Image: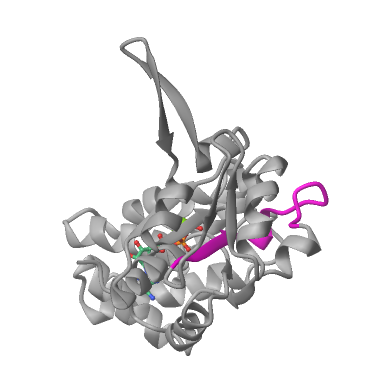
Amino acid sequence: MRPYLPQGREEELFEHAWRNQLPVLLKGPTGCGKTRFVEHMARRLGRPLYTVACHDDLTVSDLVGRHLIADGATRWVDGPLTRAVREGAICYLDEVVEARKDTTVVLHPLSDDRRILPIDRTGEVLRAPPEFMLVVSYNPGYQNLLKGMKPSTRQRFVALRFDYPEAAAEMRIVQQESGCDEALARQLVELAARLRRLKDHDLEETASTRLLIHTARLIGDGFPFLDACRAALIEPLSDDEETLEALMQLVALGHDPET
Ligand SMILES: Nc1ncnc2c1ncn2[C@@H]1O[C@H](COP(=O)(O)OP(=O)(O)OP(=O)(O)O)[C@@H](O)[C@H]1O
Ligand SMILES: [Mg+2]
């Protein structure tokens, strides 16, 4: 079981949304706990979870289902969204803005008060049971004008904003997830705070909680501190030599050789 450490009232809000049949939009940077949170809430509410990682080729059929030909006969196979509706599950569409625009045709009637899923290919119209919930996530940091979410889509969702946890919580998360001691967790969280304050390096995204956990695992396994930071914390942030060296200097500055 993968535990989740709450950061605020997100569990309560999610539960109210679920009970009131409202879909939820999670916004936040990479590696801040969105996926972990949805897994946790599905478990807590006792609902199965279907997760779909959206990409720019994702079509309505990938979500809803398609006819497959086997042994000379065609057979309809439900996609994850359809299965989730039938089972009253939670369907989580990760990075929903990546999906093809025509997916709104199925997402809109499902995420407003109609709560229906029309399946064109079979002529079926499914009514979502009260237990069904649609959850989508997106990372505002990646968005450009072309890829923003349409207001008519956004305004169907209750929005929950995620960010990197505050220091004490992030330390507990790093310790819990990597098994490292408190001193190392503190050192990494303080380092992350310095990296996150940097504004002049045009990093697409800054150091996430996920990267801190990876770094702590390598160090905990006996890999030297600075090498672990380079490999797991700094290199994933950029490909630009100068930027990497500048970031490594920050790492070295804060390094306490005693830990
Ligand atoms: N509140 C938390 N409780 C427990 N673990 C957490 C928490 N927040 C982050 N983590 C840890 O950070 C890692 C990254 O979190 P997660 O995969 O949920 O991020 P994400 O927001 O879904 O990122 P992405 O947008 O890249 O998918 C998790 O594997 C988990 O170890
Ligand atoms: Mg995720």
Q: Which of 109 and 4 is in front in this view?
A: 109
Quarter of the rendering containing residue 38:
bottom left
Q: Nearer the viewer, residue 124 or 196?
A: 124
Indicate left or right for 33 with 94 as reference: left
Q: Nearer the viewer, residue 54 or 178?
A: 54
Q: In which quarter of the image is the N terminus?
A: bottom left
Q: Residue furthest front?
A: 123
The question of residue 46 being in magenta is answered with no
Q: Is residue 68 above or below residue 41?
A: above
Q: In which quarter of the image is the C terminus?
A: bottom left
Indicate left or right for 90 with 137 as reference: left
Q: Residue furthest right?
A: 145
Quarter of the rendering containing residue 197:
bottom right
Taking the image as drawn, is residue 206 in sight?
no
Residues drawn in magenta: 132-149
Taking the image as drawn, is residue 131 in sight?
yes
Quarter of the rendering containing residue 212:
bottom left
Q: Is residue 60 above or below residue 19?
A: above
Look at 81% across and 46% down and name the residue there: 146
Look at 42% across and 71% down and name the residue there: 131
Indicate left or right for 80 with 26 as reference: left
Q: Which of 8 and 186 is in front in this view?
A: 8
User: Which x, y percent locates residue 70?
Assistant: 34, 16
User: Which x, y percent locates residue 25?
Assistant: 59, 68
User: Which x, y percent locates residue 121?
Assistant: 57, 33
User: Which x, y percent locates residue 242?
Assistant: 62, 46
